[in-house]
Image (cartoon, rainbow, N blue to C red):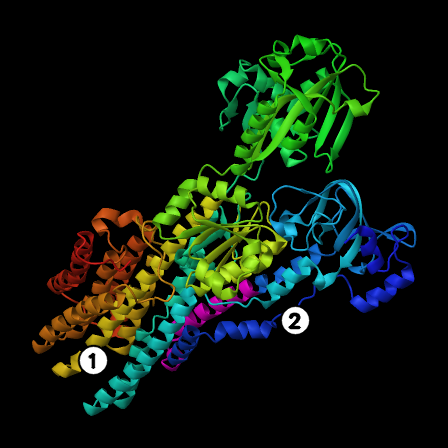
Amino acid sequence: MAAEEVVRRFASDAERGLSAEAAALRLAEHGANEIEAEAGKSAWRIWWAQLSATMVVVLLVAGLISLALRDFKDAAAIFAIVALNALFGFAQEYRAEKAMAALRRLAAPSVRVRRGGHVVEMAARDLVPGDLLVLEAGNFVGADCRLLEAATLRIDEAALTGESAPVEKASAPLASEAVPLAERINMAWLGTMVTSGRGCAVVTETGMRTELGRIAGMLERVGQEQTPLQRRLDELGRSLALVALVLVAVIFVLGLMRGEDPTLMFLTGVSMAVAAIPEGLPAVVTIALALGAQRMLKRRALIRNLPAAETLGSVTAICSDKTGTLTENRMTVTALYTGCENMRIGREWDDAVLAGQRPEFTLLLAAAALCNDAQIEGAGEERHALGDPTEAALAIAASRAGLRKPELETALPRVAELPFESARKRMTSVHRTAQCGETLPPGLRRLWPAEWHRHPFLAFTKGALESVLQVCAQQWRDGAAEVLTTAERQRIIAAGDDFAQAGQRVLGIAFRPLATTNNPADFERDLIFLGMAAISDPPRAEVRTAVEMCQAAGIRALMITGDHPLTARHVAHELGIGGRVLTGGEIEAMSPEELHALVEKVSIYARVLPEHKFRIVEALQNRGHIVSMTGDGVNDAPALKRANIGVAMGITGTDVSKQASDMVLLDDNFTTIVAAVEEGRAIYDNIRKFIRYVLAGNVGEILVMLLGPFFGMPLPLLPLQILWINLATDGLNGLALSVEPPERDAMRRPPYPPGEGILGRGIGAHILRVGAIVGLVPLAIGLLWWRRHDPAWQTMVFATLTFTQVFQTLAVRSWRESLFSIGLWSNKTAAASVTVSGALTLAIIYVPWLQRVFGTVPLTARELLFALLFSSAVFWSIEIEKWWQRRGCRHTAA
């Protein structure tokens, strides 16, 4: 629509704006210009959600049983674990609820509005449709609005659209209604910021009807899902609860059938039920997650949601934003072109340019630095520019070649200019040349053409290549101006097209000598074409290696960006991300089923909107993927919250994206995600190691208690002995497994399938196989001693079973590697824990007052050596199993 038509539709006045009365009526009609938030969960509901998980319920029952047994220490430990877990969960969910508050803060800046013919400053929450917004550099845009005037107006929309560079705005109507959000140049959006120029706009939408409001609505509708680990632990908890109930019944009934004391059998059955439940599991999970989060922090990844530390290890698809994550987030000159030659620029500049041996390129860079409003600060590696990113890239390129902008401006002071305008797509600056030969930088002085000294002024022009060529009649070649023929013009355009096809932005640069500055119409007439510069945001050097690591680890790396498809394709291919490019417009036209069928074939998404990112994540999840989504803007928040792992940028990220995320990258680097995935895999590996260790031990204990009576033996273990084994070996040694370093092949194997149970990949068979050894070896020794009527028979069962699980701890530290390969001291905590648990067991056997408490008798040196020797059987059996796996004869449980 034409600007005048828009004003009429909203019954406003382009000169005076709305009256105070009309604004008050509209405020009552439309409501405040705020992002609404649904009522969040109450504190009690959040607490209840934490305490009603299956494993937590099982633990609470175990704690109550321990109280009934008057085992107050064990009960206190169990209840402390439950409280700690609930506290962690409560804190995580409470932090997640802050995302909407961050949106509301972002949506309510102060704005300048024309009301009743006067410009007033007011809170953005009081804006109504039809208000006239006054826009200037540094202003936040307070509502969605249509531009009525735009004078060199540029707006940073990266937080909303993902576009890496400020967008140049215009007030003219668009040619079509079907235009992506990022290309609606006559609109300004709530939450974006004016970087340069000025303008006036009429408010079209406020509050939840704005683009930002639509994102907020999407964010509110995203529900919280359990992590794969939480689902797996819930399934395990339900199974163990059933096993515990069956155990109580079986042991109690068998004891009664043998004429045992009902009270003793009840206590024994309850003790076995407690032993069957790995109450140390939540503590191990919490410790493994917390320590993993600390390791990730050292690698520049901050975990906000603790379970996310483990979920990273299950990720099958990483959806990454382009700008700043895969790229360096700074526009850089990557190639220069003159009439003589074309030069690609790497991280190190050509020595010939630095030495001034290629004058065409040196003059081209000098012109680019002079026709430039960016300012350079710092030097060397600390050098950076302030201003438009494209101009900053040109100024830094010149500085790297020894052409410092302040020195150039001193030698050639600017005396006139034609600012950039969207109609012309170029800008021109005019510089005085008097005495410049004496003040030029040394690297430029001897290259300065004598012809340029003869004119009092020089005009330098830069802009879109086609626009600059339109006003050029000559080109600079071999130190002189010559006619720009049609063939040469076509060659230049073809070279520019090659750069554009590679996803780079191309700027043409020209000059003209002037005798006077009295006639600005002469500034851009009959120019001499110097050359062009290709500019892009280069990929991070280390990201390609990280992408290759992802591929080796069975993880898909996908690029999802608001940038142009050509740019996205070029950057993706440089990083090794191949496949078809899908645009937001194409996604818009697809049904959910069509997108669902296509997501496995597409790895590059360009020109996407917030709802597109959300749909992509959903489609991947529907295909069974565990999805990590990275982003930094408001537009990324719904997809971050919907993804299994939302990853926000710590440097460029908005508060909204950080609050909606599970993890924050402190260095905004894709490589950090891959490092965090490795740590996540280590966490899940360690949790699975603990589970297979503790359940194998529990199976052994159950076999001892169930099979002993079938051989005519009394109860092989007393209730307190069972609880001690459960606490010392399962707890102390099991916790040590939670701090194992990552396996050597952690990033050379595929992730675990999301639907796979925690006992998958042979762990169930391992538990039964090792559990049989853990149970039958102590039972056989106890049976032998019992038949000899040796009073130490029960202590031999206790000692052998305890030492068996100590040896088991050492053997299960790695899935495939031998203990002799990884070394005893590679996990000092495990070495200490087996030492302490062994020493405590010896104390129970040999300290008199502990003997009375636990019902043990002292063993002879021969008996102790016998128990230790046969206890090591489990160690050698597991080491042989791992040797067999390393030979490739069996699939590893990892």
| Residue 482 in picture, x, y percent from top left | 63, 15
Element type at marker 2?
A: loop
Which badge, 1 or 2, is on the more N-terminal residue?
A: 2
| Residue 729 in picture, x, y percent from top left | 29, 65
Which range of residues does the magenta coloring cover? Answer: 66-93
The quarter of the image holding the N terminus is bottom right
Q: Is residue 173 visible?
A: yes
| Residue 513 in picture, x, y percent from top left | 73, 16
Disc 1 residue crowd, few under 14, some 14–19, many 20+, Cα 10 Å: some
According to the picture, the residue beneath numbered tag 1 turns out to be 706
650 or 711, nearer to the observer: 650
849 or 267, nearer to the observer: 267
Q: Is residue 68 magenta?
A: yes
Q: Is residue 338 magenta?
A: no
* Residue at (79, 14) in percent of width and height: 515
61 or 648, nearer to the observer: 648
- CA separation in Å, label 1 and label 2: 54 Å
* Residue at (43, 46) in percent of width and height: 577
According to the picture, the residue beneath numbered tag 2 turns out to be 39
Q: Judge from the rendering whether residue 577 lies leftward or rightward of residue 706; answer left or right.
A: right
Q: Is residue 307 visible?
A: no
Which amino acid type corresponds to the residue marked 2 in the rendered image? Ala
Which callout, 1 or 2, points to the residue nearer the camera?
2
Quadrant hosting residue 59:
bottom left
